[in-house]
Image (cartoon, rainbow, N blue to C red):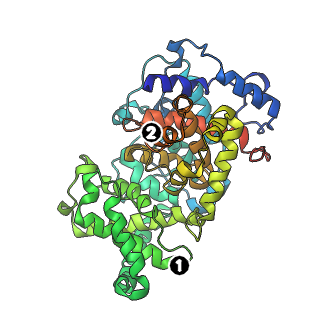
Amino acid sequence: MAAESSKQFWKRSAKLPGSIQPVYGAQHPPLDPRLTKNFIKERSKGNTLPLKNKKASSFHEFARNTSDAWDIGDDEDEDFSSSFQTLNSKVAKATAAQVLENHSKLRVKPERAQSALSEMPTNCKVIKSSSEAQLSRSPDELRKCSWPGVPREVRPVTWRLLSGYLPANKERRKLTLQRKREEYFGFIEQYYDSRNEEHHQDTYRQIHIDIPRTNPLIPLFQQPLVQEIFERILFIWAIRHPASGYVQGINDLVTPFFVVFLSEHVEEDVENFDVTTLSQDVLRSIEADSFWCMSKLLDGIQDNYTFAQPGIQKKVKALEELVSRIDEQVHNHFRKYEVEYLQFAFRWMNNLLMRELPLRCTIRLWDTYQSEPEGFSHFHLYVCAAFLIKWRKEILDEEDFQGLLMLLQNLPTIHWGNEEIGLLLAEAYRLKYMFADAPNHYRR
């Protein structure tokens, strides 16, 4: 099944026919419905590419050509959060274009994430990550380097920078971290005891129920100390955001940050690490940083969690309209068997695909989401579309409502790694490039 899925996935990543082949760095082409129709027909035909030309490259192949990606030097006096909206999208376009070009040329399967450091070019200096590590690229350059994936050693500092939590100015970083961590624990002293008050009991009770369900197969998250940390983070966030309060699904969004910031202090397998061996100061730093970075993420998608979750409702509808344009056969298959997108895609939007992917894949995905303008809100839509169409053969093979829902709610991604996520992101960017600037692409 896996081999067949890969064939179908890359059938859709072949070059577009004729005049709609995108020229990266140029003006986005308008969408011509006639060309879209031809494109769908092309994709439904038998695969004519030789198998040997369809070996996929990972984003680390692109990293080999990126000079000075993690060089260390003087810092820019810019704030990453303020420049986020002005990111030049040519960065991501070039990355995706490189991947799509390489996959048809390379025959040797790239190594997995464990060999990422050995794959990096010799002129890309990597330093051991710590809270003092200095990544001195400009905001745009750092995002360019992060789009194809961030090395484990520098991911904690990079994520703090990309989220806007850590200032780009290295002179301000230490004081900023100290101030924000103290501020968080000030919230704990001020608010956490109120969890026992009547008007907050429902919120705290729901958090307390959801925490053990968070990644139940990963031993790290079943440790009482970790669950206490998560309860504090989520309760304080809910108290400080009364417009939404706590909503099921937000608990998942803490885990990538917690794992990444824990990895700064742990060399072995993080998912099986006993956190009681860490000092209190280290645990407090991890907790506070996880809170602030999760808060930054949620600031951009808070309408997903306000009353009736209108953000998710709109995104699921947008996904339905997008799929109807890019793969009408799959869309009509759902209609034939009365499958509603809300029945499977609500979770994809509510949990940012975290229930569909292994945690290691989520972390890699978030490298790109934090590099992409509106990554968690807008770009995620195209990732979901690419993710859905990746399983088109399996979807079309199911011929009843129950079979389709069982498939869509239990997609076989357990063995996925950086390579599969890299290919998914390349396909998502291709879809975004084709459709995002076509104002009618949400309407039939």
Amino acid beneath label 1: Pro
Q: Secondary structure at mark 1?
A: loop
* x and y, in percent, of residue 96 in the image: 59, 34
According to the picture, the residue beneath numbered tag 2 turns out to be 411
* x and y, in percent, of residue 324 in the image: 69, 40
Amino acid beneath label 2: Leu
- Camera-side residue: 192 or 80? 192
- Camera-side residue: 12 or 365? 12
- Residue 92 appears in the picture as rendered: yes
Q: Give the side of residue 272 with respect to residue 250, left or right.
A: left
According to the picture, the residue beneath numbered tag 1 turns out to be 242
User: Quadrant of residue 332 in the image?
Assistant: top right
Q: Are marks 2 and 1 in contact (CB under 8 Å)?
A: no
* Mark 2 vs mark 1, CA separation in Å: 35 Å
- In percent of the image, x 71 and y 24: which residue is there? 41
- Quadrant of the frame with the C terminus: top right
Q: Secondary structure at mark 2?
A: loop
Q: Is residue 294 above or below residue 44?
A: below
Answer few, some or many: residues within 10 Å of disc 2's Cα (few below 14, many 20 plus, some between 14 and 19): few
* x and y, in percent, of residue 304 in the image: 57, 63
